[in-house]
Amino acid sequence: MGEVIVITSGKGGVGKTTTTANISTGLASMGKKVVMIDTDIGLRNLDVVMGLENRIVYDLVDAIQGNCRLKQALIKDKRFENLSLLPAAQTKDKTAVQPEQMKELCQKLKEEFDYVIVDCPAGIELGFKNATAGADKAIVVTTPEVSAVRDADRIIGLLEAAELRNPTLIVNRLRPSMVKKGDMMDINDMIDILAIELLGVVPEDELIVVSTNKGEPAVLDMHSWAGQAYRNISKRITGEEVPLISLDADSGLVSKIKKFFGFQA
Amino acid sequence: MDLFSKIMGRQGPSSKNIAKERLRLVLVHDRASISPQILDALKEDMLNVIANYMEIDRRGTEITLNSDEDSVALIASIPVLKMNRSSQNSQRSARY
């Protein structure tokens, strides 16, 4: 029996879909059988991030309403045959899916897959309730900004109300150089405020833009710093203990000058 | 903030600390918006404890969460009808 993990955040644009794509691909590259579900009906995006947008025939709503068999709606990944995507419907009504149906769907999928990774839409309405309905665990994604952390706090409260206790946190788009200058909240600040366990930290990385342009998850790019962070997070999900990557940004000119003058960097 | 930054002309608290303080305040308010059911349950529990020590007017009791600009307070107004001296003794004797 597999495990259903929902990736959520409250606020939009913090990297839920990127995180879903990278974690799922990371787990698949470790040989796990993985399926991703995009639950953002009307605003689907996981398909383009994965580079699978041209292969969609059926979608989540088709599978739930019985317009096709569940197997027919699952799109096989190009890179890993043990990775599949169940895309969201783009043109159907948001209310086409209800939490009870999602629960049933997740139940079916986890009989066959090691991991069912659910990409949750932004917001706290029906889409959120659908995405969390069948989940065993939750991962909350935030960025080091007041607005994103505030929404994460609200989401953690709602997850607990939905009996999804002990969610873990991914801090995305951290800029170590700004943290060092005191112009960005650091990991401990956010852990203190939100009082949840840290699953991983993903540094800001231009290669994420490049990989999204190409439809190839950064987790497969051995030169990408963010990709390394996602590889570590994937390993932690399987229970492996991996230390946090060192986020020392000591390559800048200023820190070189500081070192030259003997200041503590 | 270290010396180098000061020489470079950076003044005042770092923006990270401003962010933390603003976040702390906004979350106090966000988290204070608890549901009426929870507030009712809290009221019931509080009154039961207080009733061990004094006779109170349950109907005249008011419990609210008051948010100020920079703080949130639980405010309870509980009319006392009679102080119950004997219950203190009985509580104590029950404990020993």
Image (spheres, coloured by chain):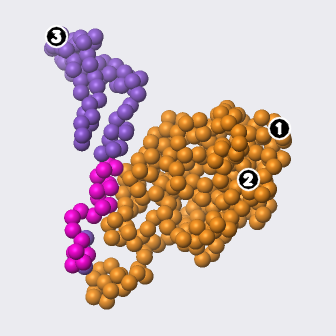
Q: Position of residue A179 (x, y in %)?
A: 37, 67
Chain drawn orange in the picture? A
**In the figure, is residue A235 to the left or right of A51?**
left
Residue neighbourhood size for the residue with mark 1, other residues' Cα within 10 Å, grouped as few (<14), some (14–19), many (≥20): few
* Proximity of marks 2 and 3: CB atoms separated by less than 8 Å: no
Chain drawn purple in the picture? B
- Vertically, is B25 above or below A206? above
- Vertically, is B51 above or below B2? above
Residue hosting label 1: A67
Q: Residue at x 21, y 78 (%)?
A: B7
Q: Quadrant of residue A261?
A: bottom left
Q: Which numbered disc, 2 or 1, marks the residue closer to the eye?
A: 1
Chain label for disc 3: B
Residue hosting label 2: A85
- As shown in the figure, which amino acid type bears the numbered disc 3? Lys
- Vertically, is A36 above or below B53? below
Q: Residue at x 26, y 16 (%)?
A: B61
Q: Residue at x 28, y 23 (%)?
A: B63
- As shown in the figure, which amino acid type bears the numbered disc 2? Leu
Q: Residue at x 79, y 56 (%)?
A: A55
Magenta stretch prevailing secondary structure: helix
Is circle 2 on the same chain as circle 1?
yes
Q: Give the Cα distance between marks 2 and 3.
A: 69 Å
Residue hosting label 3: B82
Q: Which numbered disc, 3 or 1, marks the residue closer to the eye?
A: 1
Does B18 appear in magenta? yes
Chain label for disc 1: A
Q: Where is residue A121 in the image (x, y as percent from the top left)?
A: 59, 46
User: Magenta stretch?
Assistant: B5-24
* Proximity of marks 2 and 1: CB atoms separated by less than 8 Å: no
Residue neighbourhood size for the residue with mark 2, other residues' Cα within 10 Å, grouped as few (<14), some (14–19), many (≥20): many
